[in-house]
């Protein structure tokens, strides 16, 4: 068989860069796709090449990917890094060219795990622990639910649409401490997403969030996994990972394996939970299916290359060399960390906890920073300098 090339979407995002580095480390060439080829993450030696996406919407991008993959000639592994593309590629999977493979569960499983209300209904029916929540599809329903649920409440789109990303590029969710906070949202919620999930807030800190990243075979059995702990999120308490570390957790691994086995999931998947400071229970906050996560490269540094496992399993090749003895690691996302350190939020930074974990870690790594691949971090740093100079001038 010819060498397998990976086609990875979202090359302009740290998740895409981490994916490219992981697949390159597994010995595979990687072609990146993006609408912003000038992004810092695109200036990496991990990419064989970067291709600009010209399609206006998710459907256009998915069809463009399939066309490019079909014309490529050799075997291609297609790995999306955004929920929207996972959903779209799942819908058109019958159109895959003969030389292209993905690792996705059946369409109904993708829809259940991606669509938050379907997942909540299914998970509750199976007895899994979730916070109390409701789904709203209009401002009237939103106001009614805010009056019924116990504050604080987390508001998040049912599916993070491109319009949501444009309106809220940093915040994955919105926390509301009272119904009056709705007036402070700087954009029209229902203009950027058709529906939202409202979930009661789980008391706790950033460091009370834990996750399990996994790869499941065609029988929905876990063949590789990595469990970790978030130390910081940006924005604080509600955002994406700013710092995380490995944390062996047999209970979380068992919960993850059980949930995805019952769901009939295959391929890359992950589960995030938060331990309540009130009752000590862990509540499921979000599953991910069909794609890697922002912090997935932490698993690679710890010795578990899930990205490479996915590619090789899709093409029936061995992957045991990609699942080595796990090492201690700490991973950080530089942009979020910079914002935390330079912005007053009133939320203490757990410096002693972070320092302790950093001293234990043998393999620190960044979303952009890499000793062997320095240009993305240098490019990002230079953009910080330029933006700072513009602010000083103006």
Image (spheres, rainbow, N blue to C red):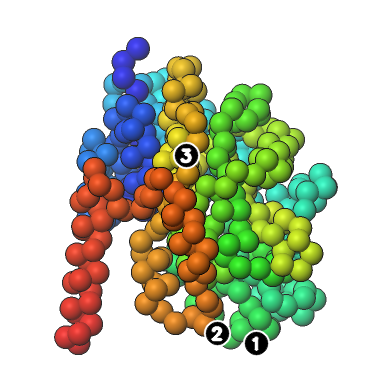
Residue position marked by numbered label 2 in the rendering: 184
Residue 8 x %, y %: 37, 39
User: Along the line of sight, which residue is nearer the eye, 6 or 227?
Assistant: 227
Rendering quarter of residue 151: bottom right
Residue at point 41%, 33% (across, down):
78
Q: Is residue 362 visible?
A: yes
Work out whether mark 2 precedes mark 3 in sequence or the reverse, and give the earlier one. Answer: 2
Dot label at residue 341: none
**Mark 2 vs 3: CB contact within 8 A:** no
User: Along the line of sight, which residue is nearer the eye, 38 or 295?
Assistant: 295
Quadrant that contains the N terminus? top left
Q: Is residue 112 visible?
A: no
User: Which mark is nearer the camera, 1 or 3?
Assistant: 3
Location of residue 68 with respect to 50 vertically, above or below: above
Residue 109 x %, y %: 66, 38
Residue at point 82%, 47% (across, down):
127
Q: Quick check: 50 left or right of 126?
A: left
Distance from the alpha carbon under mark 2 to that under mark 3: 44 Å
Residue position marked by numbered label 3 in the rendering: 327
Residue 234 x %, y %: 47, 67
Q: Quick check: 230 left or right of 375?
A: right
Location of residue 335 with respect to 32 vertically, above or below: below
Dot label at residue 180: 1
Residue at point 36%, 33% (across, down):
23
Work out whether mark 1 precedes mark 3 in sequence or the reverse, and give the earlier one. Answer: 1
């Amino acid at each position: 068989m010819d060498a397998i090339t990976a086609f990875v979407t979202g090359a302009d995002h740290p998740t895409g860069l981490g994916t490219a580095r992981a697949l390159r480390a597994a010995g595979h060439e990687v072609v990146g796709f993006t609408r912003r080829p000038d992004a810092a993450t695109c200036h990496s030696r991990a990419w064989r090449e970067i291709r600009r996406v010209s399609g206006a919407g998710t459907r256009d991008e998915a069809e463009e990917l399939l066309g490019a993959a079909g014309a490529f000639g050799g075997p291609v592994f297609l790995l999306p890094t955004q929920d929207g593309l996972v959903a779209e590629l799942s819908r058109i999977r019958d159109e895959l060219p003969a030389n292209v493979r993905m690792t996705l569960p059946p369409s109904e499983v993708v829809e259940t795990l991606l669509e938050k209300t379907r997942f909540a209904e299914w998970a509750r029916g199976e007895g899994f622990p979730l916070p109390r929540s409701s789904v709203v599809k209009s401002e009237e329903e939103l106001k009614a639910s805010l009056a019924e649920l116990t504050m604080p409440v987390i508001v998040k789109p049912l599916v993070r649409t491109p319009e949501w990303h444009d309106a809220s590029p940093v915040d994955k969710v919105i926390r509301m401490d009272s119904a009056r906070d709705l007036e402070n949202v700087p954009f029209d919620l229902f203009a950027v997403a058709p529906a939202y999930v409202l979930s009661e807030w789980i008391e706790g800190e950033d460091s009370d969030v834990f996750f399990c990243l996994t790869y499941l075979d065609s029988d929905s059995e876990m063949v590789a996994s990595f469990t970790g702990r978030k130390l910081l999120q940006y924005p604080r308490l509600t955002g994406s990972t700013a710092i995380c570390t490995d944390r062996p957790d047999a209970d979380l691994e068992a919960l993850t394996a059980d949930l995805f086995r019952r769901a009939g999931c295959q391929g890359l998947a992950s589960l995030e939970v938060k331990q309540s400071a009130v009752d000590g229970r862990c509540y499921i906050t979000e599953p991910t299916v069909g794609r890697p996560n922002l912090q997935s490269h932490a698993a690679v540094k710890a010795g578990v290359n899930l990205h490479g496992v996915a590619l090789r399993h899709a093409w029936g090749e061995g992957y045991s060399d990609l699942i080595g003895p796990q090492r201690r690691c700490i991973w950080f996302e530089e942009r979020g960390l910079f914002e935390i350190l330079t912005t007053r939020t009133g939320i203490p930074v757990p410096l002693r906890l972070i320092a302790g974990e950093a001293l234990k870690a043998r393999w620190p790594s960044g979303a952009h920073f890499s000793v062997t691949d320095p240009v993305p971090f240098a490019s990002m740093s230079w953009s910080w300098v330029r933006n700072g100079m513009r602010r000083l001038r103006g």
